[in-house]
Image (spheres, rainbow, N blue to C red):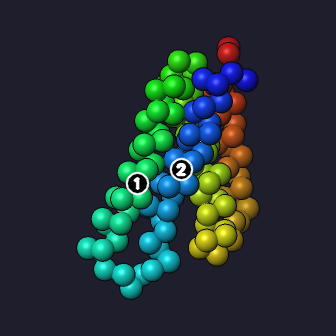
Amino acid sequence: MTWPALAPIILLLCSNVFMTFAWYGQLKFPGTSLWLVIPISWGIAFFEYCLAVPANRIGYTVYSAAQLKTMQEVITLAVFAVFSTLYLGEALKWNHLVAFALLGLAAFFAFHEF
């Protein structure tokens, strides 16, 4: 796999770690005021954008926009599954796994040449 094909995967994976903490990390601290949580989340999200924008710029040289978006959603869901289980302590249930499988099927269709 060439660097332009691999770079968006690596960058989007890292980007999604930041995004997930920016959006959902604060759920572990329900007593923290929103006026504090919002700027902290924006600060974390800044690093997400620093990785997501180049991921899409580089990725667009080898993938279509639809393929990049599908890739991003699959990565987001995988990162979130790990995050919600390990960080938030939530269990994944059968319906979540079915939803993940269907997203995997969507990725197959997005990347398959017909």
Percent coordinates x, y for residue 92 in the rendering: 69, 66
Q: Is residue 64 visible?
A: no
Identified by mark 1, the residue type is: Ala
Q: Where is mark 1, residue-wise?
A: 45
Q: Residue at x 68, y 14 (%)?
A: 114
Above or below for 77 versus 111: below
Q: Secondary structure at mark 1?
A: helix
Q: Where is mark 2, residue-wise?
A: 16
Q: Earlier in the sequence, mark 1 or mark 2?
A: 2
Q: In the visual, does 104 lie left or right of 70? A: right
Q: What is the spatial separation of the Cα atoms under label 1 and label 2, in whole angstroms? A: 9 Å
Identified by mark 2, the residue type is: Asn
> Which quarter of the figure has residue 8?
top right
Percent coordinates x, y for residue 90 in the rendering: 64, 73
Q: Quadrant of the N terminus?
A: top right
Above or below for 90 versus 96: below
